[in-house]
Image (cartoon, helix red, strand yellow):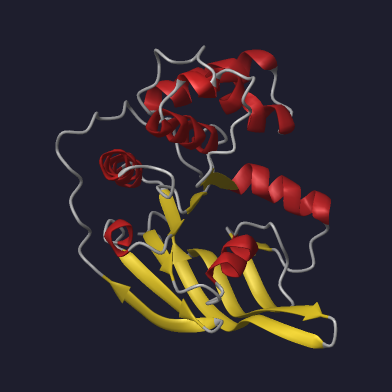
Amino acid sequence: MSTAPIIQARDLQKHYDLGAETVRALRGVDLEIHRNEYVAIMGPSGSGKSTFMNLIGCLDTPTGGEYVLNGQKVAGMKEDDLARVRNREIGFVFQTFNLLPRSTALENVELPLVYGGFAKKERRARAVQALEHVGLGDRMDHRPSQLSGGQRQRVAIARALVTRPSIILADEPTGNLDSVTSEEIMALFADLHAQGQTIIMVTHEPDIAAHAERVVTLKDGVIASDRRQTPVAPEPHRQRVQEPVGVGA
């Protein structure tokens, strides 16, 4: 494991003004995450885990404290700079997949590279490789409506991988999947982690968090616990992914 943290949060705070009331969603979070860690962020509703995810995903900026992502200070960045960091450093996987319904799997996976200004030939080659990597090389021309829930989430994971990000940030990635399909997706994450990918997963499900090697629990805007564990081994019946696409440098 690298000695330099890929994520450094120091006294991270986020406050929201709602009329005369100030909501203190994060009250001072100190956390370091290193390259190739697999971390689950847990906590009850209102604990601050969604706010924390938005901050580490560069979807929002902190009210106070400092956030350093892969050596870059995020606090104080303008929106254009935040967008560039998001596109380059972070691959997002959402509970609702967030796929374009009229686009093929290949076109959906290409999308971050379009925003990144990549040439069409390289976009296509990297998107094909990412889909093959998650076991969907034979589904590239299918639209989301022609895919199962598990396949749609695999497309979303391929889209997250295609920019070769430093971090995969997964928000309740199995929330819309049945238990068998959830295990298949967790097996895919386990393979990606084994190949060197840093994964941060927000979940409220203990059986999903059990797949991570570290569990950080938030409560009332602060870290209530931070513990390491032996991850639950993936089910052996799953389909193995292909050779790695590559992870962030």
- Tell me if residue 247 can be seen: yes
Q: Position of residue 44 (x, y in %)?
A: 46, 74
- Tell me if residue 3 can be seen: no
| 159, 70: nearer the viewer | 159
* Depicted 164 relative to depicted 172: above or below: above
Q: Position of residue 25 (x, y in %)?
A: 64, 79
| 4, 171: nearer the viewer | 171
Q: Which residue is drawn at 46% across and 26% down?
A: 130
Asked which quadrant contains residue 66, the reply is bottom right
Q: Which residue is drawn at 43% across and 52% down?
A: 198
Asked which quadrant contains residue 107, the reply is top right
Q: Position of residue 18 (x, y in %)?
A: 80, 79
* Depicted 98 relative to depicted 80: above or below: above
Please give left or right for residue 94 compared with residue 36 in the image.
Answer: right
Q: Residue at x 15, y 33 (%)?
A: 237
Image quadrant for the N terminus?
Answer: bottom left
Please give left or right for residue 202 compared with residue 112 in the image.
Answer: left
Q: Residue at x 79, y 61 (%)?
A: 77
| Residue farthest to the left, as pictured | 236
* Depicted 1 relative to depicted 195: above or below: below
